[in-house]
C-alpha cells in the first residue's frame, strides 16, 4: 500500500504544464524540496525520459511514470500530478508512438530490490482504469489520497 | 537446467524490477528453474553468456542473437497473457 506514504506536498492537481520537461521541473522540484531527491534529479529525469520514455497507454488513457537512477535519490517516495491539460509523452518501449498524459506518477526509487512492494502497489493503481478515471476528476489533494486509499483497501 | 533470463531497462531501477518479479513468479508456477540477471540495456552485451532470452521494457532494436520479449505489458497490465506465453514458449522449448 502506498496511500499512507503520500504527502500533500508531493501531490499536484490542475498542474499547468506545456511539455513533459515542464512537468518534470515542477514536480521534480517538489521531490527535491522535500528532501527525497538531490539537486541533480530534474535534469537526470529529463535525460532519462528522452532516452527511455515512460508514457503508458492504459486502454486509451495516458499515464507516465518518470523515474531515474538511484544515485539522484535520497529516499523512496512518490509524487502524483494531475495535469490541467494533456502533455505529450512518448510511450515506453517506443521511439515515436506518443500518448497524451494527464496523470503522472513520479517515482523516487532508492533501493529497487526492497521496493518491489511499493512499485507493485503503484502499478496496481496505474493498471486500474476505473481508479485512473476517478483521479482525473479530483478537485483537491485530499481526494487523490482518498481515492488511492479506497482502491488499496478494497482488496 | 537453470535458465538464465536477462531483464533490462534504462537504469535497472523500476520497470525491470517489476518485470523480473513477474518472470520469477511465472517460472515458479510453470516449474521452470530460472536465474534472473537484472541489468541496464547498456550491460546486455557483456551478460549474454548462457542466457536463454532477454526481456526488456525499453525499445531495443539490436539483435543479440537470442530471443527478445518486450516486457512493457507487465507495466501497463495490457497484453500480459500474450507476453507470458511468449516467455514460456522460449523457456520451455530449450
Image: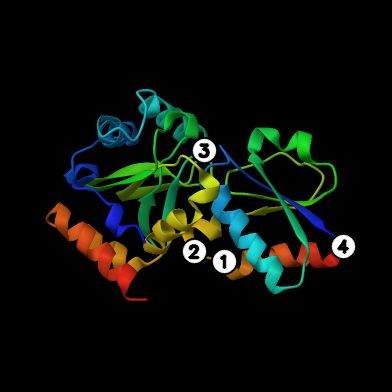
Q: Are marks 1 and 2 in contact (CB under 8 Å)?
A: yes
- The residue that label 4 is drawn on is B94
Whole-Å distance between the Cαs marked 1 and 3? 21 Å
Q: Which residue is mark 2?
A: B77
Please state the horizontal and vertical placement of residue A82, each as a whole percent of the image: 24, 49
Q: Chain of mark 3?
A: A
Disc ID at residue A43: none
Find the distance from the CA under tag 4 to the CA under tag 2. Answer: 27 Å
**Residue B75 image offset from top left, x and y in percent:** 50, 56
Whole-Å distance between the Cαs marked 4 and 3?
31 Å
In the image, are marks 4 and 3 on the same chain?
A: no
Mark 4 or 3, closer to the camera = 4
| Residue for badge 1 | B80
Q: Classify mark 2: helix, strand or loop.
A: loop
Q: Residues within 10 Å of mark 1 (few under 14, many from 20)?
A: some
Residue that appears at 65% across and 40% down:
B39
Marks 1 and 2, how far apart at CA: 6 Å
Q: Secondary structure at mark 3?
A: loop
Report if the CB atoms under discs 1 and 4 are less than 8 Å apart.
Answer: no
Q: Residues within 10 Å of mark 3 (few under 14, many from 20)?
A: many
Q: Are marks 1 and 2 on the same chain?
A: yes
Residue A109 falls in image quadrant: top left
| Residue B44 placement: quadrant | top right
What residue is shown with label 3?
Answer: A52
> Which is nearer the N-term, disc 1 or disc 4?
1
- Vertical comparison of A102 with A24: above or below: below
User: Residue at horizontal 37%, vertical 76%?
Assistant: A155
Amino acid at each position: 500500500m502506498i496511500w499512507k506514504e503520500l504527502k500533500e506536498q508531493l501531490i499536484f492537481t490542475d498542474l499547468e504544464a506545456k511539455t513533459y520537461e515542464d512537468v518534470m521541473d515542477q514536480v521534480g522540484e517538489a521531490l527535491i524540496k522535500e528532501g527525497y531527491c538531490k539537486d541533480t534529479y530534474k535534469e537526470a529525469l529529463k535525460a532519462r525520459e528522452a532516452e527511455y520514455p515512460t508514457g503508458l497507454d492504459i486502454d486509451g488513457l495516458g499515464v507516465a511514470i518518470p523515474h531515474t537512477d538511484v544515485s539522484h535519490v535520497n529516499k523512496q517516495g512518490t509524487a502524483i500530478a494531475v495535469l490541467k491539460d494533456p502533455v505529450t509523452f512518448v510511450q515506453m518501449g517506443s521511439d515515436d508512438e506518443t500518448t497524451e498524459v494527464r496523470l503522472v506518477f513520479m517515482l523516487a526509487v532508492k533501493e529497487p530490490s526492497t521496493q518491489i512492494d511499493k512499485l507493485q502497489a503503484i502499478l496496481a493503481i496505474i493498471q486500474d482504469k476505473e481508479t485512473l478515471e476517478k483521479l482525473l476528476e479530483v478537485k483537491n489533494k485530499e481526494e487523490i489520497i482518498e481515492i488511492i486509499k479506497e482502491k488499496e483497501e478494497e482488496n | 537446467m537453470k535458465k538464465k533470463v536477462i531483464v533490462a531497462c534504462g537504469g535497472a531501477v523500476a520497470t525491470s524490477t517489476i518485470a523480473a518479479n513477474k518472470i520469477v513468479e511465472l517460472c515458479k508456477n510453470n516449474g521452470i528453474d530460472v536465474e534472473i540477471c537484472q541489468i541496464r540495456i547498456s550491460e546486455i552485451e557483456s551478460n549474454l553468456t548462457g542466457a536463454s532470452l532477454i526481456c526488456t521494457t525499453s525499445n531495443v532494436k539490436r539483435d543479440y542473437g537470442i530471443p527478445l520479449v518486450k516486457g512493457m505489458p507487465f507495466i501497463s497490465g495490457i497484453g500480459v497473457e500474450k507476453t507470458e506465453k511468449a516467455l514460456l514458449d522460449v523457456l520451455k522449448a530449450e
